[in-house]
Image (cartoon, rainbow, N blue to C red):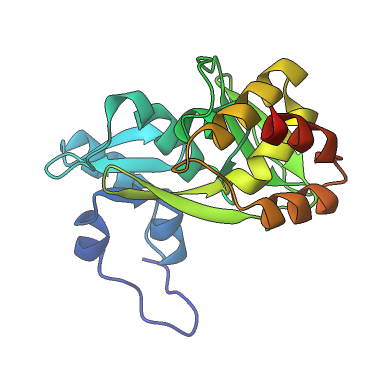
Amino acid sequence: MKKTKNKKPIPIQKLLNKSLIYSRDFRDNGYPSSLLSYYQNQGLIQKVERGLYCNVQKPPKIDFKWEDLVYIVLSIPNGVITGISALDIYDLTDEIPRFHWIAIPNNTSIGSRPSVTVIRTRNHELGLSSIKIGDIEVPIYEKERILPEAFKLLSRETAIKALKEAFRSQKKCPDVDKLVDYSRELRINIIPYLEVVTTT
C-alpha cells in the first residue's frame, strides 16, 4: 500500500462503512483502485456513478426522482446543481428536465457525461449553498442566483414563469435584496422582470 504524506491514512473499514464511497478517498489514502473492484466483486459496494460507489448494506436514502441527479453532482468535483434542475428542486418549474444541469468552475475540465448539461461559471462560489435530499447533502445554488441566471441559461418564458412562481407564495419567495445583488454580480438586468411580477 502506498503511504500518504504527512497524515495517517483513514482505515479502509472506515471508508467502507460510509453510505457513499468515493474512489478519490481510496486514492488520497494510498489504497490501490483495484481494491474497489475487489469489494465490488464481493458484493459489498456498488458503482453508482463515475468514481462513486454506494454501500450495499446501508445505501443512502434518496427519493427515486432525485437519485440520478444526486449521484451525478456528487461524482463531479466542485459540481453544483443549477439551471432547470435547480428550478425543479425548488419547485419553481413544471418542466421536466431532460438533462441534469451541473455548474463547474470555468477552468475545470470534465469528461463527457451524456445525461449532463455542464455550465462553466466564473462566479462559481456566488450563492453556493446545499440542500438535503433524503439523507444526503448536495451542493446547489440559492434560488436568488438561480432565478436571474435562468434568463441567461434558459428560455425567457421559463425564466419568467419561475420568477412569478417564486413570488406567488411566501414559502418560495426569494430575498429581493440578495436577488438584485446576485443579478448585478452576474450582469443580468432582472429589475424590469421584478417590476412586472411584483406589481401584477
Outermost residue, front direction?
199
**Residue found 42% across the figure and 49% down from its top:** 131
Q: Which of the pair 12/127 is nearer the observer?
A: 127
Q: Using the rendered view, name the quadrant where residue 125 is placed.
A: bottom right
Q: Is residue 50 above or below residue 180?
A: above
Outermost residue, bottom direction?
6
x%, y% of residue 22?
39, 50
**Residue found 34% across the figure and 24% down from its top:** 65
**Residue found 22% across the figure and 44% down from its top:** 39
Q: Using the rendered view, name the quadrant where residue 195 is placed.
A: top right
Q: Using the rendered view, name the quadrant where residue 192 is placed.
A: top right
Can residue 126 be seen in the rendering of this structure?
Answer: no
Outermost residue, left direction?
57
Q: Which of the pair 49/135 is nearer the observer?
A: 135
Q: Where, quadrant-wise, is the N terminus in this rendering?
A: bottom left
Can residue 129 be seen in the rendering of this structure?
Answer: yes
x%, y% of residue 129?
53, 55
> On the picture, is 149 further left or further right than 146?
right
> On the picture, is 59 further left or further right than 68?
left
Q: How many marks do you count on the picture?
A: 0
Q: Where, quadrant-wise, is the C terminus in this rendering?
A: top right
Q: Is residue 160 above or below residue 49?
A: above
x%, y% of residue 67?
35, 30
Q: Is residue 156 above or below residue 148?
A: above
> On the picture, is 125 further left or further right than 57?
right
x%, y% of residue 143?
58, 44
